[in-house]
């Protein structure tokens, strides 16, 4: 019988939830009691809402435990590992019986995330036992031509997973066709969209798949140098990438004459980004690698012709590269059997916001938004009403509830006014104000604009000022029209994707939630109850017990009332700080 | 566009001038001849001092033969670089989309009140610098903050302040 295995999910979010302590605890117990089972660290298992997660694999099957702390870990080792009796109440997923979280796992198809949460990301041997580096070694040993590799990628139908959706194979072909002695492969790991963490999870959970994907691209295009441009905010991803690169070099999978092929040289290094969202744009990214201010430039020439250091360069996103080894090893049909006519394969989404089961999901294209949110995600927190889902981050938009049956593929999502983007899905309920969301995204793009194009630099600032005013109850007639006019100009006169898409959150919000803007401007009301300055705090007399807590805590003495009598808020004095609302134990303060 | 500048001379605290510049000599030697060296040079300098001191700009420019204009241009472009000294603990409050939806603003307000500083400022005892950042990538634990290398999730204003208090207690002992 094989030894029992205990896997601990140690990606950034697991560690933040306390998985590090759980891991240490299990190691301690094993050492103290001299127990015979193996403990392994692994990447993101995807069920972020249940972190910390540990998986126990014994002779009978695999059991995933959620919300584990040190005490629960002790209990699990005691009962399950030592005595073979699974602790049922902590199990969140197993093949053996149904749990309430089953749907989260069962709706998924894992290609890009095939190894995440399964292997130890810091051990190349584990990657290899799962078929790792077989794709590239097969190409080299079988003397497959670069043209055939590119054709396979084209046949798979994969499109750029960073958000643009440009066909990857075609991109490779352009770079292949450019004649030059020096060519570069860049992996874009500058995952800047707020609310997205797909690439981080792949890098932390399965760095070798990205390295292998890049090596395959190098083989196809004829590149000799690779750069992974990774956000400095992802220290663990950078650490694991560097470990993976070292291990590959030792095995001869990177370096000179790879897999014994004379002249097949490829090296990768990690370049830390310095915190600029615009560097996700490919020409800005290359400027940043060259050590300059990350400002985009005009295209053409496209990077495939003149990119990094003026040499032909191919840039793909982390998730795209992670898919490549599987496509090459298992054939294009293993990928394009999923999806819709124009969007093949699967896509990873980071499901966050007001959702019950937030986490990382990989689903086949063509699934509806409703299925993702209600089936996999389990619906809205506290059973509130689903209002909208934000897709595509600051370049995307909010898709309202009545469009929830839209299928997820590049073209259908674009038709709503949002974009597929890199895969962030932030779910909003009835308490999220859409004007405030639009303001939030404009605040972000306004700060992140590099300042090169006038309309992007100043136009976004003006839009932000108008939105801020509306949120503060000082909106005027004509504001909406001015927003719309500015949006058109910014879109038309910006050089890069940041500016061209910056107004999208406002445009979609105005399209679907215009009534909320009008309520803010005309009635000075925030229907969602989010915009503080537009709220009125009143005491519900029936519920007030006269405990005086609100009056004591009111910093401006706006609340009056006798002990054991209903209190009263003087609206003229109230500064709408919300302290009374938070302090009241009887829910006797209403917000309207 | 973000705008940041070196503080005027009278606003600069004394430790701007106390830095030991010899520490960056080897860094400059290492990157001097490499292409695309400005960002690694600035990152290395910041790792040593916690910020990029004015004098370091001058030294790098002279010894690595990079125009001061280029160095300053890059340093002010990227959010990562700081031109002024920071506290011992940098408190990064996440304001990504998921955190915003889960009311990250309340966390920032609570911390601003507790530390009695504004976003981007440092406490007078040089213990804490408060920063708001875009997305730390732990969205499912929103709202989140990061102090040093430790990430804290599912915060409320109160629990965030308690974490600060704990660090303060440890520092005072």
Image (cartoon, rainbow, N blue to C red):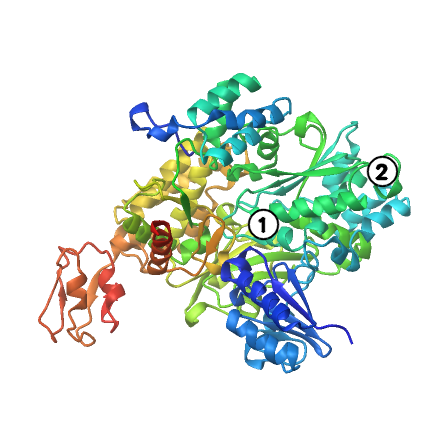
**Position in image of residue A349 (x %, y %):** 58, 57
The N terminus of chain B - image quarter = top left
Task: Name the residue at 67% across, 32% down.
Answer: A303
Q: Is residue A369 left or right of residue A583?
A: right
Residue that badge 1 annotates:
A236
Q: Residues within 10 Å of mark 1 (few under 14, many from 20)?
A: some
Task: Name the residue at 38% across, 25% down.
Answer: B17
Q: Is residue A274 left or right of residue B19?
A: right
Count of marks, rendered view: 2
Q: Is residue A305 above or below residue A364?
A: above
Query: Do the numbered discs 2 and 1 sit on residues whose CB atoms are within 8 Å?
Result: no
Identify the element where label 2 is drawn.
loop
From mark 2 to mark 1, how far is it between C-alphas?
30 Å
* Res A257 label: 2
Task: Name the residue at 64% across, 25% down.
Answer: B34
Looking at marks 2 and 1 on the same chain, the residue that comes earlier in the sequence is marked by 1
Chain of the residue under the numbered disc 2 shown in the image? A
Q: Residue furthest left?
A: A562
Q: Residues within 10 Å of mark 2 (few under 14, many from 20)?
A: some
Q: Are marks 2 and 1 on the same chain?
A: yes
Depth order, front residue of A116/A75 = A75
Chain of the residue under the numbered disc 1 shown in the image? A
Q: Quadrant of residue A266?
A: top right
Is any part of residue A159 visible from this angle? no
Q: Is residue A17 left or right of residue A314?
A: left
Depth order, front residue of A28/A242 = A28
**Position in image of residue B92 (x %, y %):** 42, 47
Identify the element where label 1 is drawn.
helix
Task: Name the residue at 20% across, 71% down.
Answer: A540
């Amino acid at each position: 019988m094989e030894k029992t295995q205990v896997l601990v999910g140690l990606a950034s979010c697991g560690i933040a939830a306390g998985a590090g302590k759980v891991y240490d605890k299990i190691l301690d117990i094993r050492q103290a009691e001299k127990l015979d089972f193996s403990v392994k660290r692994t990447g993101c298992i995807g069920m972020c809402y249940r972190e910390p997660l540990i998986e126990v694999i014994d002779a009978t099957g695999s059991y995933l435990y959620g919300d584990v702390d040190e005490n629960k870990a002790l209990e699990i080792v005691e009962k399950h590992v030592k005595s073979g009796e699974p602790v049922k109440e902590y199990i969140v997923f197993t093949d053996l019986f149904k749990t309430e979280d089953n749907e989260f796992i069962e709706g998924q198809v894992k290609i890009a995330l095939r190894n995440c949460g399964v292997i130890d990301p810091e051990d190349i041997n584990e990657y290899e036992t799962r078929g790792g580096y077989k794709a590239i070694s097969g190409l080299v040993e079988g003397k497959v031509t670069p043209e055939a590799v590119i054709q396979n990628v084209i046949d798979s139908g994969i499109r750029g997973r960073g958000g643009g959706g440009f066909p990857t194979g075609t991109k490779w072909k352009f770079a292949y066709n450019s004649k030059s002695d020096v060519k570069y492969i860049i992996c874009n790991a500058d995952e800047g969209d707020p609310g997205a963490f797909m690439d981080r999870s792949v890098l932390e959970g399965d760095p070798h798949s990205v390295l292998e994907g890049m090596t395959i691209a190098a083989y196809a295009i004829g590149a000799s140098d690779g750069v992974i441009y990774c956000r400095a905010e992802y220290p663990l991803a950078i650490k694991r990438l560097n470990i993976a690169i070292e291990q590959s070099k030792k095995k001869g999978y990177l370096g000179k004459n790879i897999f014994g092929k004379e002249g097949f040289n490829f090296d990768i290094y990690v370049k830390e980004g310095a915190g600029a969202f615009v560097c996700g744009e490919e020409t800005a990214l290359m400027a940043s690698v060259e050590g300059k201010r990350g400002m985009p430039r005009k295209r053409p020439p496209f990077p495939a012709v003149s990119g990094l250091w003026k040499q032909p360069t191919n840039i793909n996103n982390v998730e795209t590269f992670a898919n490549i080894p599987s496509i090459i090893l298992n054939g294009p049909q293993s990928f394009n059997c999923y999806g819709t006519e124009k969007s093949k394969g699967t896509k990873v989404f980071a499901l966050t916001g007001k959702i019950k089961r937030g986490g990382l999901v990989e689903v086949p294209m063509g699934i509806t938004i409703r299925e993702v949110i209600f089936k996999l995600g389990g619906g809205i927190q506290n059973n509130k009403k689903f209002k909208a889902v934000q897709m595509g981050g600051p370049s995307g938009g909010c898709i309202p509830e009545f469009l929830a049956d839209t299928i997820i593929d590049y073209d259908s999502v674009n038709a709503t006014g949002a974009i597929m983007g890199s895969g962030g899905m932030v779910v909003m309920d009835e308490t999220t104000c859409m004007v405030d969301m639009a303001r939030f995204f404009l605040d972000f793009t306004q700060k992140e604009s590099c300042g090169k194009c006038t309309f992007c630099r100043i136009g976004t600032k003006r839009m932000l000022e108008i939105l801020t005013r509306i949120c503060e109850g000082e909106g005027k007639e004509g504001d909406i029209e001015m927003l719309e006019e500015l949006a058109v100009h910014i879109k038309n006169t910006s050089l890069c994707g940041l500016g061209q898409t910056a107004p999208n959150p406002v445009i979609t919000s105005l399209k679907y939630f215009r009534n909320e803007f009008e309520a803010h401007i005309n009635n000075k009301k925030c229907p969602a109850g989010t915009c503080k300055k537009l709220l009125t705090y009143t005491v519900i007399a029936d519920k007030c017990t006269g405990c005086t807590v609100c009056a004591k805590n009111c910093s401006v003495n706006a609340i009056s009332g006798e002990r054991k009598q209903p209190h009263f808020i003087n609206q003229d004095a109230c500064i709408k700080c919300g302290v009374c609302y938070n302090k009241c134990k009887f829910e006797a303060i209403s917000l309207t | 566009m973000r705008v940041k500048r070196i503080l005027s001379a009278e606003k600069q605290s004394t430790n701007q001038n106390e830095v030991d510049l010899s520490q960056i000599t080897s860094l400059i030697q290492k990157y001097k001849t490499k292409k695309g060296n400005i960002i690694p040079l600035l990152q290395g300098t910041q790792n040593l001092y916690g910020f990029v001191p004015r004098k370091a700009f001058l030294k790098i420019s002279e010894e690595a033969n990079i125009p001061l204009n280029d160095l300053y241009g890059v340093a002010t472009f990227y959010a990562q670089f700081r031109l002024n000294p920071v506290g011992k603990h940098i408190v990064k409050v996440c304001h990504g989309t998921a955190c915003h939806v889960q009311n990250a603003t309340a966390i920032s307000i609570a911390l601003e009140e507790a530390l009695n500083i504004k976003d981007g400022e440092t406490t007078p005892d040089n213990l804490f610098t408060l920063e708001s950042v875009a997305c730390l990538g732990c969205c499912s634990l929103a709202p989140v903050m990061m102090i040093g290398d430790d990430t804290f999730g599912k915060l409320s204003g109160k629990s965030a302040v308690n974490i600060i208090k704990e660090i303060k207690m440890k520092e005072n002992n």
